[in-house]
Amino acid sequence: MSFKPTKGHDNRLSDPVNLRKNRPNRLIGEKSPYLLQHAYNPVDWRPWGVEAFERARQEDKPILLSIGYSTCHWCHVMEKESFEDDEVAEIMNRVFVSIKVDREERPDIDHTYMTVCQIMTGGGGWPLNIVMTADRKPFFAGTYFPKNSRHGRIGLIELSERIEHLWLNDRAQIDDATEKIVTALNVPAPRGVSGALDLEVLRTAFQQLSQRFDPKYGGFGEAPKFPTPHNILFLLRYWKRSGDERSLQMVTKTLDQMRLGGIFDHVGFGFHRYSTDAQWLTPHFEKMLYDQAMLALAYTEAYQATSKISYKKTAEEIFDYVLRDLTSPEGAFYSAEDADSEGEEGKFYLWTLDEIRGALPDTEANLVERAFNVFSMGNFKEETTQSLTGRNILHLKRPLEQLNGQLGFSENQIQEIWESARKRLLQIREKRVHPHKDDKILTDWNGLMIAALSKASRVFGNKAYAVAAGKAANFIITSMCDTDGRLLRRYRLGEAGLSAHVDDYSFLVWGLLELYETTFEPQYLKIAVDLNKDFVQRFWDKEQGGFFFTANDSEKLLVRQKEIYDGATPSGNSVAAMNLIKLSRITGSTELDSMASDIGKAFSGPLTQFPSAYTQFLLFLDFLLGPSFEVVVVGPKGSTETENILSHLNASYIPNKVVVFKPCGEEDSDIISIASYTKDFGMVNQRATVYVCGNYTCESPTNDPEKMLSMLRTN
């Protein structure tokens, strides 16, 4: 097997130094781009599996488990400094059986051992490095290790020597440490009291977010600052419920400042992972599919709520980036783009003043220089010395349209000049060496993007987004299931594999529900119902409620976890709770309604203590507490009257509803088979008709879109 670099891209799989120096190790047969990045390391890496654990037993060695992902900057730093180093490799190969894991392929392993690291060190992150026994019991944990000890951080060489001495001379200390960690892992989470989740939880979450809100730059907390779009989605709903303008102000300030800052790629669009400072200026430059999806949802809903055109434009620009750079030939979506190119973080995205002046006509160059804060000294600092490099992160301090007085052009002229300059800069940038692209297709992250595209399609009236969402959904349904129809997690190089986890099922069902409400194609709703049944059968905790992270027949790890914390991505349980309540309202299933409530009961302890850590779950709670609505539209599909009703629905910010469409005639049998209660719903006055129900009661049907909206009005 050989690898050829993709033209114009930084491709670590075929680094000529590595190819010249080393034969491939046991990672060479893997599909993961992250594992393949390490396939020519002199470290004798093995993939996670029976062979590695048996080798450790036979040779009586500890295991060094190293977990990361292909676009992780510090993973690259540690690889270059340590894992590509012959001296480090020699001692690692002597002391350990070394295992590499891609956290994006195996989040079950990552979650388990990240919890270990947090218990042992009080923190975590990637690269994640665990030392453990052959029976997978950990006794040491850490993140980045340099080759040699410095700045109070132990080096990998010294660490390996210490582990070797301990392993050979004091096995009893290791056994004691492993038992303590395993015991701590298996302490059950406290179960909350039924009925504890009420409106006060929503108010508390709002107050906690208010306390952490940065009134100057938006966002929550201090540097590093993450976008956390689920906070935005919750605050929009809280504003809708309470009318509290402070909630909406936190939303608009955060979305405005992120769009102005360097965390947004003004030339090629899309958002970088997070900001290293409070101002959203200097990003960590990697781009993740899940960030694009969740942020697009946040900007789309904010546009619905405020009608602010810049939010619509930002969401559209995110989709422009994803459809241009992260879309596979099959129509599914790739995972990420790296922060680094040519060994430097951010190099692909930065500009010197001379580059700007050399690339653009004077008028355009002057506008970019002044509007986007480009200086000869630059604003990007070298990572270790923090000295200015002469390179610039393009960013705005005010919206472009507000600079007309300062720049001497009208708003329209500024936009035209900038768009011409942006396209030219993008053409030039495309000729640079691109960051590495992680081209694996993950079911869960694709589910998020399907949801985002579907919602934007109906809100913006852009059918192309629904087409893109449908292509991705169809690919996963047809190409990412095994012969028994069971959902799989990863697709790459023509092969699907790895067992799906809670996020894969819940995020894909979410995407299918959004796609159904956009296209009203019944097959998407039917597949969502069927997938959810399989999900419940394999993942549901019958004793305590909630969904386990892994299926009941998955590989047994140290502990079978259940996640509710909404971190970089929402938790599977948070999304599953919303899916269950929506499916219950669509299908009329009281069993699904009860299961949704049981998820809340299972996690009510932590949810009531610090609810702002679970804002995606609070979207479900807001729906559950109501008012929420079931809307059934009956009429000829595609008719002017039907489309008028749907356009009124889609233009209005009414997050807590489900919409079912029943077409006229023989086509209605598909939806009746899923939602049997619609059997007797028909058109009134032979016109497209809307039925609105809420709080277990139904209003009189209407043909009038405005009357429909009055029924759905909650404040």
Image (cartoon, grey):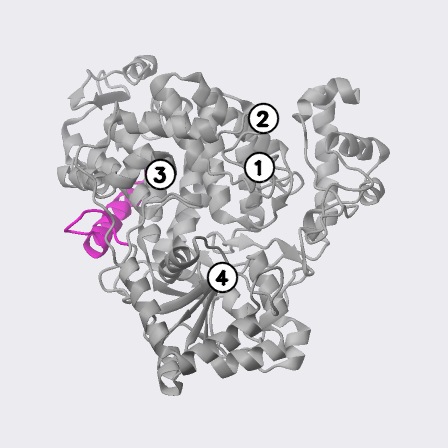
Report which residue position mark 2 lands on: 216
Q: Is 586 displayed left or right of 543 in the figure?
A: right
* Labels 3 and 4: the sequence-earlier one: 4
Report which residue position mark 3 lands on: 614
Q: Residue at x 23, y 42 (%)?
A: 599
* Mark sitting on residue 407: none
Residue 694: give x, y in percent of width and height: 21, 22
Q: Secondary structure at mark 3?
A: loop
Q: Secondary structure at mark 2?
A: loop
Choose between 579 and 650: the one closer to the eye. Answer: 579
* Labels 1 and 3: the sequence-earlier one: 1
The residue carrying pointer 1 sits among few (fewer than 14), some (14 to 19) or many (20 or more) residues within 10 Å by Cα, namely some
Disc number lying in front (4 or 2): 2
Q: Is 320 displayed left or right of 677 in the figure?
A: right
Disc number lying in front (1 or 3): 3
* Mark sitting on residue 68: 4
In the image, is residue 516 part of the stretch drawn in magenta?
no
Residue 105: give x, y in percent of width and height: 42, 61
User: Can residue 704 be seen in the rendering of this structure?
Assistant: yes
Instruction: Look at label 1 and name its amino acid.
Output: Glu
Instruction: Look at label 3 and name its amino acid.
Output: Tyr
The residue carrying pointer 3 sits among few (fewer than 14), some (14 to 19) or many (20 or more) residues within 10 Å by Cα, namely many
Residue 673: give x, y in percent of width and height: 17, 41
Instruction: Look at label 4 and name its amino acid.
Output: Gly
* Pointers 4 and 2 in contact (C-beta within 8 Å): no
